[in-house]
């Protein structure tokens, strides 16, 4: 029991951003987070992490050829793949906001770097369950795109895409959602990782058609502690990282009016997401990653 307790304690440490910030390789970060998370989870059957064979299904483009049953093909010339308990036969598309405002934060990590940790960990976790994984990096434009795939080696391609994201320019949500609708027809899961400093109605214009198509959408809102609980004892000049506009604010405003405004925006986003059947998850950059991963697994279970 003592050894198990020590393992779980170590696992929790691997989920903390201040520990992860010392790991330069994003692949290593994703492996450390997911393995630490699974140790803490005790591989609970509640979350479907069994690798027991369940059934066959017809092969579809993008499936990993490792799971083709060649014996069945030799007998019937039908291409089928093995499914396992806990699989969803689905895809996960990661949309990571790399606009200038995501560069804010730290230490130990900026919102963008935390978003990269989260996106890479979700990709690694989904890959373990043989789900196809893709990603899109965007700001005002779509900067990089990897189509969902479960083929061998594609995970590294996705991780490289995530790791190469750099914070710059403003945010336009219509571009990534339009790109997604053009490229992906198959029903699946979409995880959007952003600070969501945007007009909520404009965001919903992009998300609503995806929800109507049957896509499961979760909005991970990543914010820094200083954005949620600012600590200023004197007048401070605040600059909009995306527009360059600056305004001087008094500590009284930051203490009284600002918390009400940021909470109002967060609550409005959560209500709007719920109104179209999407999920909203607020994440601090100081939070360990286990709760975000738990939300993903619960989100994923609804498709089984």
Image (cartoon, rainbow, N blue to C red):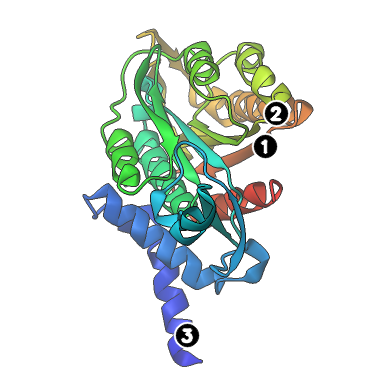
* Element marked by disc 2: helix
Mark 1 vs mark 3, CA separation in Å: 33 Å
Q: Residue furthest right?
A: 275
Quadrant of the rendered image containing residue 99: top left
- Position of 255 compared to 127: left or right? right
* Residue at mark 1 to residue at mark 2: CA–CA distance: 6 Å
Quarter-wise, where is residue 45 in the image?
bottom right
Depth check: give the residue in front, 85 or 204.
85
Q: Earlier in the sequence, mark 3 or mark 2?
A: 3
Asked if residue 291 lies left or right of residue 107, the reply is right
Q: In 3D space, how far apart are the residues under numbered discs 3 and 2 (Cα atoms)? A: 39 Å
Residue position for label 3: 4
Disc 1 element: strand
Dividing the picture into quadrants, the one containing residue 169 is top left
Given residues 108 and 146, the one toward you in this image is 146
Identify the residue position indicated by label 2 in the image.
Answer: 273
User: Which mark is first along the chain, 3 or 1?
Assistant: 3
> Residue sitting at 63 percent across and 21 percent down?
207
Residue 211, given in percent of the width and then of the height, sits at: 69, 26
Image side of residue 273 versus residue 139, left or right? right
- Answer yes or no: do the residues labelled 3 and 2 have beta carbons within 8 Å? no
Q: Position of residue 205 (x, y in %)?
A: 65, 12
Count of number-bearing discs: 3
Tell me whether the residue at label 1 lies in contact with that at label 2, contact meaning CB atoms closer than 8 angstroms. yes
Who comes first in sequence, dot 1 or dot 2? 2
Q: Residue at x 44, y 57 (%)?
A: 70
- Report if residue 292 is visible in the image: yes
Crowding at dot 3, Cα within 10 Å, few <14 / some 14-19 / many 20+, comes out as: few
Q: Is residue 26 above or below residue 268?
A: below
Q: Position of residue 145 (x, y in %)?
A: 37, 25
Q: Give coordinates of residue 46: x percent, y percent.
A: 67, 66
Residue under numbered circle 1: 279
């Amino acid at each position: 029991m003592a050894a198990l307790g020590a393992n779980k304690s170590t696992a929790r440490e691997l989920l903390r951003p201040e520990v992860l910030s010392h790991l330069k390789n994003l692949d290593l970060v994703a492996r450390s987070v997911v393995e630490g998370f699974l140790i803490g989870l005790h591989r609970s059957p509640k979350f479907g992490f069994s690798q027991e064979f369940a059934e066959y299904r017809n092969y579809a483009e993008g499936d990993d050829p490792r799971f083709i049953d060649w014996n069945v093909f030799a007998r019937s010339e039908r291409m089928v793949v093995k499914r396992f308990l806990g699989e969803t036969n689905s895809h996960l598309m990661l949309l990571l906001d790399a606009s200038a405002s995501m560069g804010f934060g730290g230490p130990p990590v900026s919102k963008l770097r935390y978003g990269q940790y989260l996106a890479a960990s979700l990709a690694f976790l989904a890959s373990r369950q043989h789900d196809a994984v893709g990603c899109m990096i965007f700001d005002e434009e779509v900067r990089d795109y990897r189509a969902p795939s479960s083929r061998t080696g594609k995970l590294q391609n996705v991780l490289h895409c995530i790791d190469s994201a750099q914070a710059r320019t403003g945010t336009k949500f219509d571009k990534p959602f339009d790109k997604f609708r053009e490229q992906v027809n198959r029903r699946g899961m979409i995880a959007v990782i952003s600070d969501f400093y945007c007009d909520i109605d404009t965001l919903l214009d992009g998300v609503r058609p995806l929800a109507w198509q049957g896509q499961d959408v979760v909005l991970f809102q990543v914010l820094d502690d200083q954005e949620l609980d600012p600590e200023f004892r004197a007048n401070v000049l605040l600059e909009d990282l995306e527009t360059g506009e600056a305004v001087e604010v008094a500590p009284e405003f930051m203490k009284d009016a600002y918390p009400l405004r940021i909470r109002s925006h967060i609550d409005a986003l959560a209500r709007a997401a719920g109104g179209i059947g999407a999920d909203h998850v607020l994440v601090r950059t100081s939070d360990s990653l286990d709760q975000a991963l738990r939300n993903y697994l619960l989100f994923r279970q609804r498709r089984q």
